[in-house]
Every structure is written in structure tokens, then in C-alpha cells.
Image (cartoon, rainbow, N blue to C red):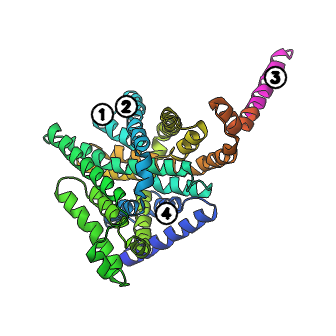
Amino acid sequence: MHIDSTLTQIAIVVTAALAGGIILERFKQPAILGYILAGVFLGPSCFGFIENKEAIYDLADLGVLMLLFVVGMELSLRPFVNIWTVAVGCVALQVVGGLAIAFPLAHFFHWPLNLTLLLAFVFALSSTAVAVKMLDTIGELKTGTGRLTIGVLVAQDLAIVPMILIIRGLQPGGEFNLTIMLLKILISLGLLAVLVWYLSRKERIRLPFLTQVAGHVDLTPLMGLAFCFGASAIAGLSGLSAAYGAFLAGLIMGNSHERQVFIEKMTPIYSVLMMIFFLSIGLLLNVNFIWENLGKVLMILVFITLGKTALNISILHLLRQPWTKSFLSGVVLGQLGEFSFLLATVGEEVGIVTQYGTNLIVSLTVLSLALSPIWLATAKRLHDIAPRRTTSFMKLLNLLFGREFLFLQRIYKKCKQGLSRRANLPD
């Protein structure tokens, strides 16, 4: 069904996405899953209401900038500074683990090196929106486990900048200058480190141009948008990343005296742009691609989900976190993140990723996010057994999945007994 009116398309998209978000929230699941499902149903893979997706993708890019801007504004620097060594070390090991997951798959499926490296970055990232929702649902958002998980998520968001710079540096046919690329990465990380150090030492900073508009209903959100997009433009023109500029702008504004006012005024704009961002992921999902490559996609998804969860748990315990905290945080971080879409887009722009690679990344991301209810159930069990102070990994596994193991064991014994009786029956 084709609809000509752009306004009608927008009305259908917004209504369907809102309905999907409300339904998923009623089932205590992240609203973003409803937005993605609305995009899948309205996109070319199903009903085909929306065929021209370029305008929505442009708005989705603004949603990415707003996401990082709000992450920067809401980041509490002092708690993050206290755990930054664990968070940064965890992300570094996650990238290494992503490479360890990607290279065997690349060898098996004959993927090129550039696609393998991009997929390794994708595997290392988790969904901030889903993880925060899971922590809030199980009441762990303000606990030590919640702070640890949020710290890792923030470090992953920061890692987007060097990832994008590396991907752009691998552009086929272009001049790959390792020195320039490393210089850009060092400048971006160095500037960020200095800014975090400076802001964490001061109570609040006062920005005169924010003070002048903070009490104005119309100018307050516009000034916030101008600050976000202006910093993004400067960072992009400097050869760094627009997303990096948005995060720095949020970090500065989040440590100003007017922080709470701007968060309240900009939340509605942020919510709309984020809805469009996740909706665009659903629109980009190619259901026919999943069906034609169902076995491959499911095998990779299982390999990634189990491998990533086990990797997160092992890394956090290696960094001297207790088993219970490591297990809960590792499960919450077990899905792929929304920035996979951004990395796939950048890879396609520079020619690293073909349409096949984009379809694969988007399919894996959407299916991984769709598995979050299962992971949420696991996280709830972990939350319930946390007071028992479990120190043994095997004991923790037994407490978590002992009922399922016993059920499977009983089925196995019954099947074995049935086969034995059949074998003993006379012909």
C-alpha cells in the first residue's frame, strides 16, 4: 500500500510508534522495542506504508546527536571518575573480545577484514536505553551494580569516537594515514580526559549565555539544541566526529548551574528524536534478508549473545568484581547496542560495508534487542539471589538455572528410558 502524502506518512509513523511503545511498556519492556517493531511493520519488508526513508534517516542522525548530548548532561562525573579505570579497562577488553568473536565468524563465512573489524566494534557495544530500563525494572539503577554498569555504558559511548575515526580511516581507495588517525584519536581522548578532570574538580560552572535564557520557555530548548548542534558542527569540521562534539556539549551543560532546567525543557525533543531513531532501525530491517539467511543469522546471534554475556562476566570478574555483581552486570550488557546502526551507516558511507553487511548488522541488532525480555528475566533472578552473597560461579549458575537444568535432565532420562524400552521390544 503506497501513501503519497508526506504528512500522512508522518502521522501514521508517529501514531504506530507511540502505540508500540505504550504496548511494550505495559508488558514492562523497553519502549524502544515498540518503536522498532512499528518501523518493521510500516517499512518495505511488511506493509510498505513508508518507502522513502531518507528524511527519517536524517532525523535519526539528529537522534544520535541528542542521545549523546543527553548522556553527557546526565553523566555524574564524580561517581564515574571513581570507577573510570574499571569502566575503561572493561571496554578495552570488550573490543579485544569482540575481535575474538568476529574473526572465527569471519573465517567461517569468508568476510573481508574491514567488515570483520567493524563487526568487532559492533559486538563490543551494548544498548544504553535497554540496559538502563533493565536496571530500573529490577531496582538496581542506583546500586553499586547499577553505577558499575552505567560507567561501562558511558565508556562504550565514549569509545564510539575512536571507532568512527578508525572506520573512516579504512576507506577503500583513500589514503590511509595511520599517523593522522592516531593523532585525531589522541586529541579527542586527551581533550575529553582534561575536560572530565576539570569539571569533576569544580562544583558547578556558570555559562553566561545559558543564564540569560534559562527562564524563557521558548528559548531554553532552542539554546540547548543550538549548543548541541553547534558543538557537533565544530567537532565535525575539525575532522573529529559530530557525535563527539554533541557529547562534550552535554558534558559541559550537565555541569552548569542550569543543568536541571535544560534537562526538563529538552526531554520532550529528545524523546521524539529517539523515537524516530529506533523507528528508522525498524524501517531499515529487511525481513526477507533474515528469512533467506535464517540459519546463518540465528547461529551468529546465539554465538554473539552467549559469547558476549560470558565475555562481560569474565572481564568484570577479572577486574576484581564479585561474581554476583559481575554476572548481573554482564547479563544486562549482553545485547547489541543502538550505535551498531551508526557504525553500519558510517561503514556504508565510506564503502567498507555493502548492503549485505548493513542488513546483517541491523538484523543482528534488532533481534538482539528483541531478546532483552529473556535477559531481563535472568537479571530479575540475579537480583533476587544477590543477598545470598554467592561467591562460587557454579553455585551461582545452579541458583539461576537449576530448575531448567533439572527439567532438561528429567526429559533426557525419560527419552533415554523410552529408547531403551523400544530397543528391548521383540520384533
Count the numbered circles shown.
4
Q: Which residue is mark 2?
A: 106
| Label 1 – label 4 distance at C-alpha | 32 Å
Residue holding disc 1? 112
**What amino acid is at disc 4?**
Tyr
Q: Which residues are magenta?
A: 408-427
Q: Mark 2 or mark 4, which has the lower sequence index?
A: 4
Give the amino acid at mark 3: Gln
N-terminal of the pair, mark 2 or mark 3, is 2
Q: Is residue 354 a member of the stretch shown in magenta?
A: no
Is residue 205 in sight in this rendering? yes
Q: Quadrant of residue 412?
A: top right
Residue 174 occupies quadrant: top left
Label 1, label 2: how far apart the Cα atoms are:
7 Å
Q: Are marks 1 and 2 in contact (CB under 8 Å)?
A: yes
| Residue 419 locus on image (x, y percent) | 78, 22
- How many C-alpha atoms fall within 10 Å of the one at disc 4: few (<14), some, or many (≥20)? many
- Along the horizontal axis of the image, is 119 left or right of 402? left
Kindly identify which residue carries mark 4: 35
- Between 420 and 118, which is closer to the camera in this rendering? 118
Dot 3, how many residues are within 10 Å of its Cα: few (below 14), some (14-19), or many (20+)? few
Q: Secondary structure at mark 3?
A: helix
In three-dimensional space, the C-alpha distance between marks 3 and 4, rounded to whole angstroms, equals 48 Å
User: Which numbered disc, 2 or 3, marks the residue closer to the eye?
Assistant: 2
